[in-house]
Image (cartoon, grey):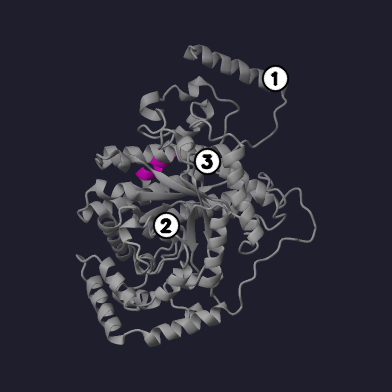
Amino acid sequence: MQIDPERARQLRAEYDDAVLREGKELAGPFITVSGRPIERVYDPTDTAHLDYERDINLPGSYPFTRGIHRTGYRGKPWTIRMFSGFGSVEETNQRYKDLLATGNNGLSIAFDMPTLMGYDHDDPWAEGEFGSCGVAVDHLGDMELLLEGIPLDRITTSMTINSPAPVVWALFIAAAEKRGIPRAKLAGTLQNDILKEYIAQNEFIYPPAESMRLVTDTIEFASKEMPLWNPISVSGYHIREAGATAAQELAFTLADGIEYVKWAVARGLDIDSFAPRISFFFNAHNDFFEEIAKYRAARRIWARQMRERFGAKNPRSWVLRFHTQTAGVSLTEQQPEVNLIRVAIQALAAVLGGTQSLHTDAMDEAIALPSDKAARLAVRTQQVILHETGVINTVDPLGGSWFVERLTADIERDALDYFAKIEALGGVIPAIESGFFQKEIADASARFQREVDTRDRIIVGVNEYILDEPREIPILRMDPEGEKRHLARLKKHRAERDPHRHAAAMLALENASRDPKANTMPYILDAVNAGATVGEICGMWRRVFGEYREHVVV
């Protein structure tokens, strides 16, 4: 297609004049979920500043705007990886087996709040929190039951855990090795993204620097011992769920990723020894094209940062691989069946954006943990997209769209502007401590809510198309005896472990934790194999590192 730029501008002006004369356009506003104004139409002038080879190129070629694999999903479909965990380890283990039978080819483990915050379930802090938002795990025996019968050497496993991540990862490794599966054969991902906790989710324990030391320990350990494991999944999902825009999600997530790279390089690691195993986790929200553009911009920015800023030589270090979850914050308690439609559109955006794995939310998650039927329908949504829509037939079918390429470039520019602001504040940790991220997200969240309140933004079933009808969604009920079994098992575990071996392992771990030159992971593995619990190890770190208190920013 050839067109003179001046002629294109003339045609655009004539078109705009004609539209205005006809006066048939709705009032709008025509903006994305993030509040980005969208032009009436896009044409070649919107992409004239882009160089095809430098900025777009073919799939599988630098800067990977069009995807990281040359053959896209024609070569390998995305992994269906459903996030699941509730109540007792026995109940969750059965749900995992059901999901694998339904067609999952990867698991993602959700932990409950005491586990996430590093408390054992007989601690007074944990009262009333057992299994309510994930599965309860305190010690190696729990992890063995959770994974019983799961083919850990044939699937990939993701674990959403942050402050206690090194401990829970050690439990996973120890459970696999007791079954005869070497750690080097384990494939999966540890979320382990503590920076986003300070920015958005607030499930932190220790101060940022001490937390970053533990994260760096896991990155170093994986680079030497576990070549198939991703030691960190840098998560924009929770940043977006807190109210961030698409550009903020992208910028803050990649800034966090760059910070982890800085710490690992400062540890003395060669960037090509660990960068290929860094993965990312993004949200898929309602604005179809904005989400697709966000993923394309993410790949381009990361590739350039790794190659041009950090000097990575291995092309695998330039590649941004990511998991996607549909937007939990977009789900509504009102008319929950409508959530099936939202999730399908969000999932399609993730696929067209080139995700490597995908979780689709169940329609009832705004009400309770998913029922069996809702979880199955969520899996079926992905299978319909994969097998029935034809979107996998060609790689990056939206590549070259004037609209998509311009939107990709705009989001990239906004993210780079945020990078400059963060650097001006002294980097990610000073920006966290000053409240920069938190204020930016709060302002974006407030803007969105104002638009809903004034009905400038319609949410189906919430502020328009409202029905007054009884809800007929079945609610998942947990086994009421699960907590009793769990606490009895914890008491028995403590009584039966070797007290001398346990005490020696805990002392060795504490000494290593006080030594900034030591990698704590081997000592954590020794401790959990000696019977140490999540709460005991995290409690020791609370004494050694201290606990972080967020600075309130008004």
Query: Of the residues under marks 3 and 2, which one precedes in the sequence?
Result: 2
Q: Look at the image and say whether residue 416 sits in the magenta stretch.
A: yes
Q: Look at the image and say whether residue 85 sits in the magenta stretch.
A: no
In the image, which residues are magenta?
414-420
Q: Residue at x 61, y 36 (%)?
A: 389
Residue at mark 1 to residue at mark 2: CA–CA distance: 49 Å
**Residue 212 spot, x, y in % from top left:** 31, 61
Tell which of 239 and 479 is nearer to you: 479
Residue at mark 3 to residue at mark 1: CA–CA distance: 39 Å
Tell me whether circle 1 and circle 2 mark residues in contact (CB < 8 Å): no
Q: Which residue is mark 2?
A: 196
Tell which of 496 and 408 is nearer to you: 496
Q: Nearer the viewer, mark 1 or mark 2?
A: 2
Mark 3 surroundings: few (<14), some (14-19) or many (≥20) residues within 10 A: many
Q: Which residue is mark 1?
A: 21
Residue 180 as seen in the image, left or right of residue 105 = left
